[in-house]
Amino acid sequence: MIKTFYPGDPAPHFACRSSNSNLFHFNTAGGRYIVLSFLGTSTHPEMAAVLDYIYGPASSFFDDKKICFFGLSVDPNDEKILRQRLPGIRFFWDFDKEVSLEFGAIENKQNNIYHPFTLVLDPLLRVIANIPITPAKTHNETLDKLLASLPTIDDHAGVKLNAPILIVPRVFEPEFCQMLIAKYQENGGEESGFMRETNGQTVGVYDNSFKRRSDFNIQSPELIKATQQRIRRFLLPEVKRAFQYDATRMERYLVACYNSESGGFFRPHRDNTTKGTAHRRFAVTLNLNAEEFEGGNLRFPEFGTQTYRAPTGGAVVFSCSLLHEATPVTKGNRYAFLPFLYDEDAAKIREENVTFISNETINLNT
């Protein structure tokens, strides 16, 4: 059965090789309008006409800030023909037809009948319009009018959006914040990576183009206990009140440093997209020196350009499934305590998935 997408439908998340990545995670592309065209093959005359429009009259729309274009091909020959044009124009190589099947562009992998269409998605990766590609002339005219009418990212919902987060002041007292910073400065930090799914395994990845941060992992049982006591007493009751969630476990005891000299940042990502991180429920960003740096704010691209910063000793709490980023620190050093919260049911998931966590690391900096 061919799937039909209607306005308001969420676009399925997928990972696929693309013109700019060996494995592009589509769920990280939120925060802008997206034109996602299921082309099949560029050799079809109608598809060629659509591509002429994309590369030509429509190209001025695609700036990667407000709007971007992704074309999807199942024809291996297209990898030699189609070229990305940055900013704004990229291609997915769906040669195994997995993504086309997921989106309903084909009924099954053996069926050579392709049903081309274009989805226009909002910054939340939800459908605004589903436009048949044939006839190409009608498709191009319809898409052109729609793209020209799109409001700013902050106005896409018709009202101002705020990210569904919780900000709680007075979790750590100032003296405790300074002590944690002193521990970092005394011990120094190590380069911080991030988790990624590779061949079914969760591996650590180091990539300075995606993340620049140094971490000090707290080893002292007494200091770990001190952080637990404060989180349990001053933060968890507010998490319960806001989200109706009883967090019973905390993962990761570290002091992170985003350094302005290296432009410390963390590009848009989600915190629970691998088997090794699927148990994570809420992320906590607890600032230790909010008044001593510039930049370095939290942003949730799917909900607009607004940024968020908790005061010193205060925490921002949010679902690990939300797309978020740490904007570059432009002055000073930003120090933060960054645990994850979960419960007993999630602990079972963590235990079940431990076999999928690999000791392998991938360093993309060399």
Image (spheres, rainbow, N blue to C red):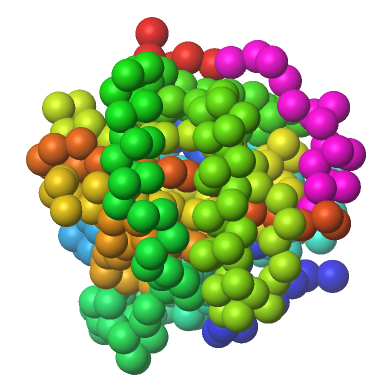
Q: Looking at the magenta stretch, what is its main secondary structure?
A: helix
Answer yes or no: is residue 12 visible.
Answer: yes
Task: Give the magenta part as a residue range.
Answer: 346-361
**Which one is nearer the viewer's eye here, 331 or 236?**
236
Answer yes or no: is residue 46 visible.
Answer: no
Q: Position of residue 212 (x, y in %)?
A: 33, 30
Q: Is residue 311 left or right of residue 69?
A: left
Q: Position of residue 103 (x, y in %)?
A: 68, 62
Q: Position of residue 57 (x, y in %)?
A: 22, 62
Residue situated furthest left in the rendering: 331
Quadrant where the N terminus sits is: bottom right
**Which one is nearer the viewer's eye here, 362 or 219?**
219
Q: Position of residue 357 (x, y in %)?
A: 74, 26
Q: Is residue 330 left or right of residue 283?
A: left
Question: Which residue does the image show at 34% across and 36% down from the upper left?
Answer: 179
Measured along the vertical axis of the image, is residue 199 above or below residue 124?
A: above
Q: Is residue 103 left or right of residue 7?
A: right
Quadrant where the C terminus sits is: top left
Question: Which residue does the image show at 27% across and 69% down from the upper left?
Answer: 306
Does residue 133 show up magenta in the picture? no
Question: Which residue does the image show at 80% across and 42% down from the upper left?
Answer: 350
Does residue 351 show up magenta in the picture? yes
Measured along the vertical axis of the image, is residue 272 above or below residue 62?
A: above
Question: Which residue does the image show at 72% across and 68% down from the upper left?
Answer: 246
